[in-house]
Amino acid sequence: MKPVLFSFWRSLAAWRVRIALNIKGIEYNLSVVNLLEGEQFNDSFTSYNPEHSVPVLQLGNQSFAQSLAIIEYLDEKYKQNPLLPTNLKLRYLCRRFSLISAADSHPVIVPRVRNLLASEYKFNEVQVNDFCRYFMKRGCEAMEGLLEHEEYSSLQTHGPYVLGKNISMADLCLIPHIQGARNYGVDVSNYDRLISVETALYENVEFERAHPKHHPGFVKKQ
């Protein structure tokens, strides 16, 4: 029986996990949870995740939530195509880079935060968008700055990805973040290192197949 990934096309976190599953070569079925229509609050979904968020990965009779926790679980369970280095310092560098988006930027732009700003603090649509753009831009600046540090830049002499020649969880966080920043109007063309990594990653079919444009319900931004 194939795993089931509860996902939504606009979810940056679910996007990370789709890439991970593709890289691991794990076939899965998608179950769409429309976050904009509040389906994450349905009782049927709450039984899987009381946090009311995606992704949730159903493996047999077990459910897993939180994108980075899922990715690390998959990496430990399925040894092919590792997404975290075995070297302790490199594992730290991988996690540090990943958390810029997954912990510091993305959590403050999700629907529950946007809805709170609009309903409780009376932000209009432009103000909510500006708020989100600010934090996504900060994330881009931080990631670009890290890639300029010697401990990262020295790795990139060996390959085109965040940690050099091997794709890692850090790359799985970079890809959704850049597109998320674009969605909120951030001009990402100034982040030369990020764009270079992004370009190299999309040469891998596992990244292309995970793109939201292939996700059921995708709506192209006008």
Image: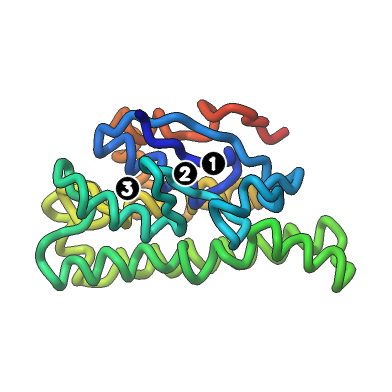
Q: Secondary structure at mark 2?
A: helix
Q: Quadrant of the N terminus?
A: top left
Tell me which numbered mark, 3 or 1, is placed earlier along the sequence.
Answer: 1
Q: Nearer the viewer, residue 37 or 192?
A: 37
Task: Answer above or below: position of 150 versus 157.
Answer: below
Q: Which residue is mark 1?
A: 7
The answer to whether 193 appears left or right of 24 in the picture is right
Amino acid type of the residue tagged 2 in the rendering:
Trp
Displayed quadrant of residue 27: top left
- Horizontal and vertical percent position of residue 147: 30, 64
Q: Residue at x 29, y 55 (%)?
A: 73
Q: Nearer the viewer, mark 3 or mark 1?
A: 1
Q: Residue at x 58, y 27 (%)?
A: 216
Please report whichever mark, 2 or 1, sits nearer to the chain's N-terminal start: 1
Query: Residue 177: image x %, image y %?
Result: 49, 53
| Earlier sequence position, callout 3 versus callout 2 | 2
Q: Residues within 10 Å of mark 1 (few under 14, many from 20)?
A: many
**Disc 1 element:** strand
Reading the image, the residue beneath label 2 is 15
> Taking 15 as reference, is 205 left or right?
left
CA gap, disc 2 and disc 1: 8 Å
Q: Find residue 221 and report its horizontal and vertical position in percent.
A: 68, 35
The tag on residue 197 is 3
* Real-space CA distance between mark 3 and mark 1, rounded to the nearest whole angstrom: 25 Å
